């Protein structure tokens, strides 16, 4: 899950950078190739709209960042709790000499899913 969050964060940063580049490129193209355009849509308005989109991306990123941090902290707490629980179970098994039957296919699948999402286990 953490990798997906980091990937999403990088996507926001790249989108922001791309918007900056597009805006500067458009300004340059308009100034050099169309100094007196009389088209349907004013290029200056398009650039302002682009700035508004960029602002919106920045706003979304600002709202996303605290959620990302909280998500990472929650994952770490869940992992720590799960590790403690597994340790307690193993100790109880040792103390009681309890032998458990082999894992079912469903249990194996769930175990593998947990390991793929929480490699620390």
Image (spheres, rainbow, N blue to C red):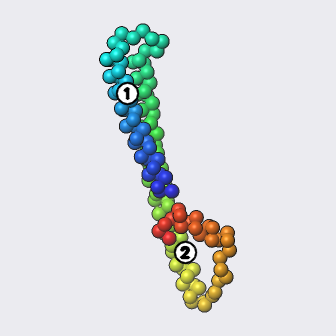
Residue 32, x across and y down, in percent: 31, 17
Residue 86, x across and y down, in percent: 54, 76
Residue 39, x across and y down, in percent: 45, 11
What residue sits 47% from the left and 47% below the top?
8
- Disc number placed over residue 88 in the picture, else none: none
Name the side, left or right, on which 37 lies relative to 111: left
- The residue at which mark 1 appears reads as 23
Spatial distance from mark 2 to mark 1, Cα to Cα?
54 Å
Element assignment for label 2: helix
Instruction: Classify residue 22 by image quadrant.
Output: top left
What residue sits 52% from the left and 78% below the top?
87
Residue 106, x across and y down, in percent: 67, 69
What residue sits 63% from the left and 88% below the top?
98
How packed mark 1 is, by other alpha carbons closer than 10 Å (few <14, some 14-19, many 20 or more), is some
Mark 2 or mark 1, earlier in chain:
1
- Disc number placed over residue 85 in the picture, else none: 2
What residue sits 49% from the left and 66% below the top?
119
Q: Compared with residue 113, is residue 52 higher up or lower down, i.e. above or below? A: above
Element assignment for label 1: helix
């Amino acid at each position: 899950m953490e990798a997906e969050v980091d990937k999403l964060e990088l996507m926001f940063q790249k989108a922001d950078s791309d918007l900056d580049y597009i805006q500067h490129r458009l300004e340059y193209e308009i100034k050099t190739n169309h100094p007196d355009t009389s088209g349907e849509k004013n290029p200056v308005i398009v650039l302002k709209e682009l700035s508004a989109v960029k602002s919106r991306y920045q706003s979304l990123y600002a709202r996303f960042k605290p959620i990302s941090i909280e998500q990472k902290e929650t994952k770490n707490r869940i992992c720590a709790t799960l590790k403690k629980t597994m340790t307690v179970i193993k100790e109880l098994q040792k103390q009681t000499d309890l032998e458990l039957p082999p894992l079912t296919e469903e249990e194996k699948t769930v175990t593998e899913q947990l390991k793929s999402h929480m490699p620390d286990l």
